[in-house]
Amino acid sequence: MVSHHGYGTRAGSYINNSTQERIRAEHVYDIQVENSTIREISQHNPITPSQPLGNSSMVPNESPQRRYLLPLFFTEGGPNWLYNSFRISVRLALYQQRSIVLLPFHKHFVTQKDTSSRIRNFNDTFDLEKLRQLLPLATTDEFQRECGDNLTADDVILSRLFRKPRSNIQYLKEGYAKHVDLFRSMFGLVLPNAEDVWDSTYNVSARISTSPNSRCLIVSSPWELRHMELPNGEELYRRVDKHFVRAPYIVSAANLLSRQICDGGKFAVLHWRNRTGETGCRPGDNSDEHCRSVLARLGSMYKYAGVIVQSLTESMKSRGLECLYVAYPLYDQAILPLLGKSTRLYTRDDIIPPSSDIAEYKEDNYVWSLIEQEFARKAKLFFACAKSNWSQLVKHGRLEETINVKDLPGLPSNVRMMVR
């Protein structure tokens, strides 16, 4: 654990070479993520055993035994997909009065050139103690100890995977089977076999309705349950969002660094993303038909970049704002020169770390993305990408105004599709 001179404490993050070698000898494993095998170093538990786990007074536990919810989302997308999937899982655990099992997260697959650790502990990302005020927390070791010998297929909710044909059960089983293999290698957890969970009579709604009967519930692809109707469901989400907040060292660093934006005054934040980088395509890359199609649409958006900038700046001026911070993936930069002509523009390049500790954060894309989300959360106005998990997670925690970029006035329909 490294202390960062008043900016908060980051657990298990930057460590010296001798400590790295010691940990490497203890916890090295192969995991399969995004179809590529990587060597990683990580603690098996996302929280340390020395941290006490107990029921929160806010969540009554009427059962003499603790009840658990283990979410399975690790192989399904980038980090913000994982965060939102966990948020959805917490709501269900809260409703059913369960302990939520904490899991690590991983970096986005498009940041492979970033040499920092791919696997990130829960308390590197979110505030463990704040979440503990909402509901009881559990480790994978506790779940294995309390549930491992008694798990059955009836304890598993296997949600539909929206990217695949809903009628194709094989895709659903394969998604769950990946987690069966992964969790056995990472945590020593033995989950029910996919063949036992799925058969021709499987009914998601029926399994959900009987889920309260399971002491140890496993939810695969919790994202698919985001719109599930629960009594007081929106109020449950509001409670979750008050307690599912970023780690203290992230919040402290963001509070300090945001003073460099607009001289400490009010500012807007734009999350700018056209997603071309996530398909493997970049401007100038015409290697296959798919890339050519993507780049053709991208060229159309660049054609209308001036319209986008004009609408953004008019929205800001009507609210008395002149400063704009742009959070963007490293490959989406073409619009910045235009924005710089009509706003007081700030990006990561304009933020000067006041110490070597903060400088480390800026070099770590995983951490810097979290800090930028904090900029966006506290901004007076936030321009969001409506379909982006990054933007959605920010919106959940905001009190000020948010505008979806696709809803800006004057944008042609084809451009709205590219900026949604």
Image (cartoon, rainbow, N blue to C red):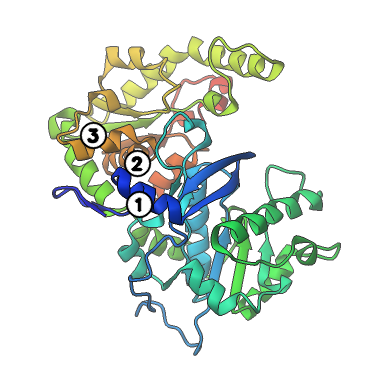
Q: Position of residue 65 (x, y in %)?
A: 51, 86
Q: Position of residue 385 (x, y in %)?
A: 46, 34
Answer yes or no: do the residues labelled 3 and 2 have beta carbons within 8 Å? no
**Residue type marked 2:** Val
Answer yes or no: do the residues labelled 1 and 2 have beta carbons within 8 Å? yes
Question: Is 294 on the left-hand or right-hand side of 134?
Answer: right
Q: Which label's residue is closer to the chain start, 3 or 1?
A: 1
Residue at 31% in and 65% down: 129
Vertical relation: 253 (above or below) 352:
below
Q: Visible in this render: residue 227? A: no
Residue behind mark 2 = 367
Question: Is 8 on the left-hand or right-hand side of 159?
Answer: left
Under tag 2, what secondary structure? helix
Residue behind mark 1 = 124
Cα separation between marks 1 and 2: 9 Å
Residue at 52% in and 46% down: 81
Q: Quadrant of the N terminus?
A: bottom left
Vertical relation: 255 (above or below) 263:
below
Q: Which label's residue is closer to the chain start, 3 or 2?
A: 3
The answer to which image quadrant residue 56 occupies is bottom left
Cα separation between marks 3 and 1: 16 Å
The answer to which image quadrant residue 375 occupies is top left
Under tag 1, what secondary structure? helix
Question: Is 356 on the left-hand or right-hand side of 168?
Answer: left
Q: Nearer the viewer, residue 105 or 95?
A: 105
**Residue type marked 3:** Ala
Residue behind mark 3 = 359
Residue at 80% in and 51% down: 170
**Residue type marked 1:** Asp
Q: How many marks?
A: 3
State the mark number for residue 58: none
Cα separation between marks 3 and 2: 11 Å
